[in-house]
Image (cartoon, rainbow, N blue to C red):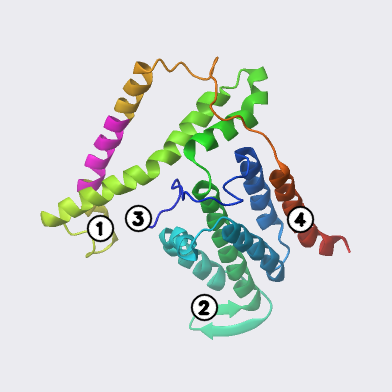
Amino acid sequence: MRDITLGQYYPVDSPIHRLDPRTKIILIFLYIIAVFLVPNLLMYIPVAAYLMLAAWLAKLPFSMLLRSLKPMRILLIITFVLNLFFASGTQKLLQIGGFVLWQEGLLTALTFSLRLILLVTGSSILTLTTAPVTLTDGLERLASPLKVIKFPAHEMAMMMTIALRFIPTLIEEADKIMKAQTARGADFETGNLMARARAMIPLLVPLFISAFRRAGDLAMAMEARCYRGGEGRTRLHKLAYTKRDVLAFLSILLLYAIILLPRML
């Protein structure tokens, strides 16, 4: 559970950390679109290089990026195997019993697996390099034009950020509960899938109770501090675009050019 990096913040001083949160939110959406626009496996190389460059500039340890993929390993294996053996094609590579491995199936399995790895890693970089309060301000500012149609931009941003903020807290709470239940004889490792699911009930019930208790405490604390939403709210730090943000937008445009130009030629 400690391998889940979504919602965690890695506090260092780096060019990526100093970017405007609105820039990072827009860049991650453009990056996700770019991942889906990749025409072939070869074009995943510049996308992966762009991601590694962002992680290097953010001074994030490579081990932390690998940790973000660890909770997804089962989904990655299932995605790879299903696309490998259940995709049809024209060129046969291998046959094992009733399963046929086609060249198109292998390419499809690699494509979907790489896509999932790049998406999860890119999303982790956003939360690792952006503090929850800063992320709230960025989401609110981006959604502020929707206030014309009475869209609750501040409330939406606050709910999303609180949810991200409490992911590490709930993970730590779940780890404590699991260790306490294991010390009392609970077994979470052996048995079939149904047995493991039943064994999770002593973990999930106190975890949900703790989550609701924390939510009530947070609501009471916000009311005690006279929190009334975003109306008339001031900010300690004003958001402003700088040259770094311009360079960041130019970098994603360069990535799009590398991906799309071969299609146009």
The residue sitting at 66% across, 52% down in the picture is: 31
The residue sitting at 52% across, 28% down in the picture is: 156
Q: Amino acid at mark 3?
A: Arg
Quadrant containing the C terminus is bottom right
Q: Amino acid at mark 2?
A: Phe
The residue sitting at 50% across, 50% down in the picture is: 128
Residue beneath disc 2: 99
Towards the viewer: 129 or 218: 129
> Does label 1 or label 4 sit earlier along the sequence?
1
Residue numbers of the magenta segment:
202-214
Cα–Cα gap, marks 1 and 3: 19 Å
State yes or no: discs 4 and 3 in contact (Cβ < 8 Å).
no
Label 2's element? strand
Residue 90 x, y percent position in the rendering = 69, 77
Q: Would you identify the image quadrant in which residue 184 lies?
A: bottom left
> Does label 2 or label 4 sit earlier along the sequence?
2
Residue 77 x, y percent position in the rendering = 46, 67
Tell me, yes or no, if residue 115 can be seen here: no
Residue beneath disc 4: 256
111 falls in the magenta region = no
Q: Amino acid at mark 4?
A: Tyr
Towards the viewer: 134 or 32: 134
Cα–Cα gap, marks 1 and 4: 45 Å
Label 4's element? helix
Label 1's element? helix
Left or right of 253? Residue 14 is left
Q: Nearer the viewer, mark 1 or mark 4?
A: 4
Label 4 crowd bin: few (<14), some (14–19), many (20+), radius 10 Å: many
